[in-house]
Image (cartoon, coloured by chain):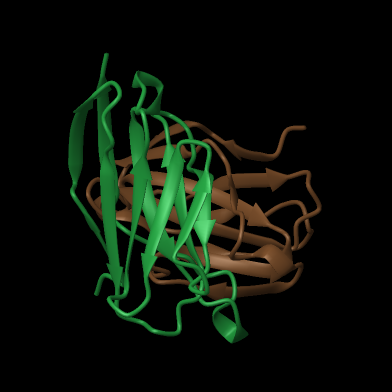
Chain colours: A brown, B green
Amino acid sequence: NAGVTQTPKFQVLKTGQSMTLQCAQDMNHEYMSWYRQDPGMGLRLIHYSVGAGITDQGEVPNGYNVSRSTTEDFPLRLLSAAPSQTSVYFCASSRWDRANEKLFFGSGTQLSVL
Amino acid sequence: QQQVKQSPQSLIVQKGGIPIINCAYENTAFDYFPWYQQFPGKGPALLIAIRPDVSEKKEGRFTISFNKSAKQFSLHIMDSQPGDSATYFCAASRGRGSTLGRLYFGRGTQLTVWP
């Protein structure tokens, strides 16, 4: 079982560039979410989705877009990268009825914006 | 505003010691309190969790103590081992309504267990 797969593992961007962080899960989970992890800040929710076609904002959504066209995929888009978006990004998934109970996390994408 | 406050930021113990990590919350609507463990280069993984209808939960060497009136909960690791060296996050969430699925994490505790 692959679980939650994130690509790329590492990325360096210049300010103003755009990119998409990919996330895919093979567990048929309805619930998917994106977190960012910064030193000393824990994990903060960016966006989440409770099913295909349904997304909503988390605690720190500014500068990020998401869409959910399939159950499996939940990409995170940075339209114009800023140094403040330098972080480690984690995608997570769960069954909807256990959305709070057990999140399965990917291994993360380390992003640096210069 | 940090919804869940975690301390200490770092903790060093010797093998066999009992590290204790503490968390506090304000929102009385929270009804689920998990702990996640994260090793370097990996995503967090669920370790143990508790609901407020019990005051303690044990799973192997890991124990959560929960004090509903004080709005505090803590993780104890019995007979700690070097392999327990990791970052630990407490979290809290509401199990109902529009906030279903939203976990609020503490800032993390970096635990080092010396052999």
Quarter the C terminus of chain B occupies: top left
Quarter the N terminus of chain B occupies: bottom left
Nearer-the-camera pick, B24 or A74 = B24
Residue at 38%, 58% (x, y): give it. B65
Nearer-the-camera pick, A44 or B25 = B25
Residue B67 found in image quarter = bottom left
Residue at 45%, 77% (x, y): give it. B30
Instruction: Report the side of A51 relative to A48 (left or right).
Output: right
Q: Does residue A44 appear in this view?
A: no
Instruction: Report the side of A81 relative to A105 (left or right).
Output: left
A43 vs A50: above or below: above
B28 vs B61: above or below: below
User: In the image, residue B68 lies at what x, y percent?
Assistant: 37, 76
User: In the image, residue A114 lies at what x, y percent?
Assistant: 25, 41
Q: Does residue A110 appear in this view?
A: yes
Residue at 72%, 46% (x, y): give it. A25
B20 vs B83: above or below: below
B95 vs B84: above or below: below
Residue at 71%, 52% (x, y): give it. A73
